[in-house]
Amino acid sequence: GQNIDQPTEMTATEGAIVQINCTYQTSGFNGLFWYQQHAGEAPTFLSYNVLDGLEEKGRFSSFLSRSKGYSYLLLKELQMKDSASYLCAVRDPPTDSWGKFQFGAGTQVVVTP
Amino acid sequence: DGGITQSPKYLFRKEGQNVTLSCEQNLNHDAMYWYRQDPGQGLRLIYYSQIVNDFQKGDIAEGYSVSREKKESFPLTVTSAQKNPTAFYLCASSIEEGDKQYFGPGTRLTVT
């Protein structure tokens, strides 16, 4: 199984940068996903890392270090609409052709004017 | 437009009643999942299905049941055996098992 830790809440100002950390202790690893979830809505996929390094997608970037069991999601040029919960999810290695996901509790990002 | 629909958005039931939550997808995805979300906790997997007529228990299957008679549909029944059924329920699908998941809008179930 996995133990996934994220900060509960972070606050930042519009236009600023925020980095959301995610650490995991695993019995196996087959990729890390980040999702965004606005209150009362469905999570939506943001990014995916399976190899070490940085993946950049517009204002959002995600980094992975497998040796450290660590990832971060970087949100640049924050906008008010970025106020949401950000979920870190680790995919288990496939066993019997199945790769399950373990989700962290989410980090609530509050963007202030 | 392709996507996943869940209905209803809000559901209220009395204790002791079974209730079925609907999940339909027109993405032609093979894999479907049911999660439960509680405040301060990560999504927890209830059941998943890789193909039609096949499904497996997730981490918290007790008190729940599912069926997968059609590729597009994966309804979840919350039975009276579920001790704490009030929660936000999310259905998801992916092209194949382990791929990124697409989530439905969720159903908030309140049992009193």
Image: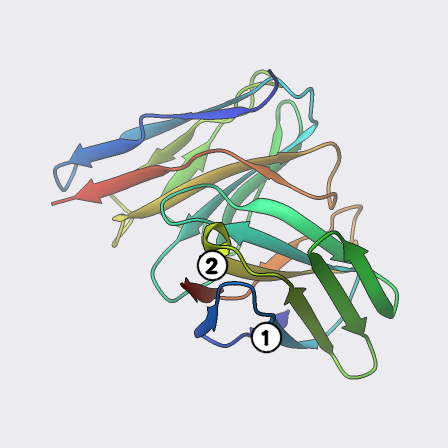
| A68 lies above or below A46 | below
Q: Nearer the viewer, residue A34 or A89?
A: A34
Q: Are marks 2 and 1 in contact (CB under 8 Å)?
A: no
Residue underneath mark 1: A3
Spot occupied by residue A26 in the image (x, y as percentages of width and height) = 70, 75
Q: Is residue B18 visible?
A: no
- The residue beneath circle 2 is A85
Q: Position of residue B60 (x, y in %)?
A: 45, 54
Residue neighbourhood size for the residue with mark 1, other residues' Cα within 10 Å, grouped as few (<14), some (14–19), many (≥20): few
Is residue A79 visible to us here?
yes
Judge from the rendering whether residue A44 lies leftward or rightward of residue A28; answer left or right: left
Which is in the foreground here, disc 2 or disc 1?
2
Q: Is residue B109 above or below residue A65?
A: above
Residue B31 image offset from top left, x and y in percent: 67, 33
User: Callout 1, which amino acid?
Assistant: Asn
Q: Is residue B12 left or right of residue A108?
A: left
Q: Amino acid at mark 2?
A: Ser
Q: Could you tell me which secondary element the residue under label 1 belongs to?
A: strand
